[in-house]
Amino acid sequence: MANDNKKPACTRRELEETNFLIRHVNYKKQPVSVIIFAFEESTYAYINNCMHMHRPLNCQQDAIFDETGKYLRCSMHGFVFEPKTGECQSPVCFGQCLQALRLEEIDGTLYFAEKHLTLSD
Ligand code: FES
């Protein structure tokens, strides 16, 4: 059972009904948006900030995956990322990673398991 310190992100059911969700939180005292998605049975959350030019992955279109569904893709210039690690696979930023946020699932609800994260009002 969740206690008062848990920071709910979404429910598993919400994720099953969409390709991704966006949540706005404070991380290390900065307001950020977060992408949350399910991929190959697991769930992932990353700060929605492409390291190339610091744009949200969905800045140009309402999508965060490429046409194959195997890679995350920034819609600004098309850089792609491994969904499981957030590692960029495109030459300019190869090896750099999106900032991952840990999730914990309890009874069908996903919670942010990050000490330096607070929910936005
Ligand atoms: S800002 Fe993401 S690929 Fe350029």
Image: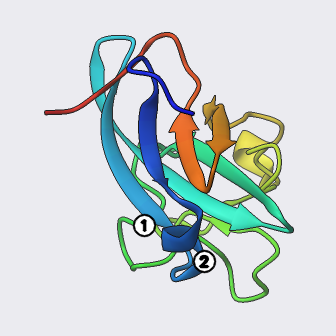
Q: Position of residue 53 (x, y in %)?
A: 45, 43
| 67 shown above or below 105 | below
Q: Secondary structure at mark 1?
A: loop
| 52 shown above or below 7 | below
| Among the 4 quarters of the image, the one containing residue 117 | top left
| Among the 4 quarters of the image, the one containing residue 100 | top right
Q: Position of residue 20 (x, y in %)?
A: 52, 69
Relative horizontal placement of residue 98, taking residue 118 as reference (left or right): right
Q: Position of residue 13 (x, y in %)?
A: 55, 72
Residue drawn at x 61%, y 62% is 37
**What residue did someone put label 1 on?**
58
**Quadrant where the C terminus is found in the figure:** top left
| 10 shown above or below 51 | below
Q: Is residue 116 in sight in this rendering?
A: yes
**What residue did someone put label 2 on?**
16
Residue drawn at x 36%, y 74% is 60
